[in-house]
Image (spheres, rainbow, N blue to C red):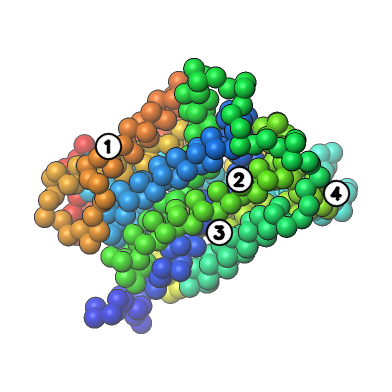
Amino acid sequence: MTAGGPEGQPPRPAGQLLDVLGLAFGLAGSVGGTIGAGILRTPGLVAAQLPSAPLVLGAWLLGGLYALLGAVCIAELAASLPRAGGWYVYAERAFGRRSGALVGTTDWLAHCIGLAWVATTAGELLAAVLPQLSELPWLGTDHHATAGRLLALLILALFSAIQLLGVRAGGASQELLSLAKAAAFLGLVLLCFLLPTPFSPEQQPIWSWPQQLSLSHLPVAGVLALQAVITTYDGWASPVYFAEEFSDPDRDLPRSLIGGVLAVVGLYLLINLALLHVLPLQLLAHASIPAADAARALLGPRGGQVITAVALVALLGLINTVVMAAPRILYGLGRDGLLPGGIAAVNPGGTPVPALLITTGSAALLVLVGSFERLLGMGAFLYVGLPLVGVAALLQLRRREPELARPFLCWGYPLTPLLVGGVSLAFLLASLRSDTTNSLLAAGLVAAGSLPVLLRPAPSPQASGESGSDA
């Protein structure tokens, strides 16, 4: 039995990933991996720092530019090295086996932490929508929290079952959920512009310069706002985890990365314009969930239900992306001999089943632990470092392997990767300084998780393919 291969190439043998994905999935993966419930909350954080519409929109544009330049850099690597494993692939090729092991472990751990938190949040929202579940006596004293955890586990099980059906089912669900997510947010935007706002124009002088913001404080306020914005753009690199499964990676991977970022930037700007249209800046700046305040202002009590539905759609699309992506990291590590080879086993549908079960099982354990404050602080530090790894790999491979086939070339090289790397390094150092404890714990967790990988014997060239010298 064989699996389909690109046109003009022999089909792949059974037991390998299937190269059946295209541009539609790539765009859906980028949008699905980026847009979560954070965009419902972050506009208030940005407006609190920059209480002026032009400054708010400027911050979202700058954050989008950073993500776009990062996508341009990684598009070269993804098209040149279309292999499963995410950031690990580039670190291993550029810096060697040990560096690849560290990066792969870091990436997978960050995915598991994020998956557990998002599933728990979705479970809590569902528990609020279905209050009768919280009234079941066998749930214990903290009915709502227990019901939320059980629903989170059911969500993980549901999306794992979808992935077990194969990559085509997983890809179709991703495209459907990303389309539903975009439609939900666009529907929210339309409501903001079409329904009459309860606030008078005199209450919304959004285009004037705020008197309370001085030029001397603008740089600090701008940095704080950009930190929130760039965090909300996290996830734009999701297509790289499926690089080996695109039928035409040379063309579709760059288009997926760049097109996905542009789609997200456009949607984020529309959402912020809609919120600025409905809410006075003072209310926007003090709102914990501005979209909920805007919906309640337009629809009354039903507004909260609308935002809950939008948040659920956003979270479910994100869960599907992570449940698909994270097992590909373990698959790449296992296939290349950095983990036991059984982890890389693939079912006929193209799903790495052991890697999937390990990933969702680990996330389920974190859901049961139930305390995410420290884990999220650790995960944030891990995520910040990954784009920096990609940029460093791009620079290293350009220097050491100039003959490497590059179907797509990074625009503005070397200025673009240097700029993206500088911003990523600044955010990494800022994270280390502002949250030293969690950052050091994250580094220790990565070291402990990588130790079994580093102690394994070096894989044969046939198992690992070409890679850089050990670092």
Secondary structure beneath dot 1 equals helix
Compare residues 407 and 362 and report the one nearer the observer: 407
Tell me which label, 4 or 2, sits earlier in the chain.
2
Tell me which label, 3 or 2, sits earlier in the chain.
2
Please name the residue that numbered disc 1 is placed on.
418
The answer for how far apart the CA atoms under marks 1 and 2 are is 30 Å
Secondary structure beneath dot 4 equals loop
State the mark number for residue 272. Answer: 2
Q: Are marks 3 and 2 in contact (CB under 8 Å)?
A: no
Q: Residue 287 at x, y = what percent?
A: 71, 35
Amino acid type, mark 1: Leu
The answer for how far apart the CA atoms under marks 3 and 1 are is 33 Å
Secondary structure beneath dot 2 equals helix
Amino acid type, mark 2: Asn
The answer for how far apart the CA atoms under marks 4 and 1 are is 49 Å
Q: Residue 26 at x, y = what percent?
A: 43, 63
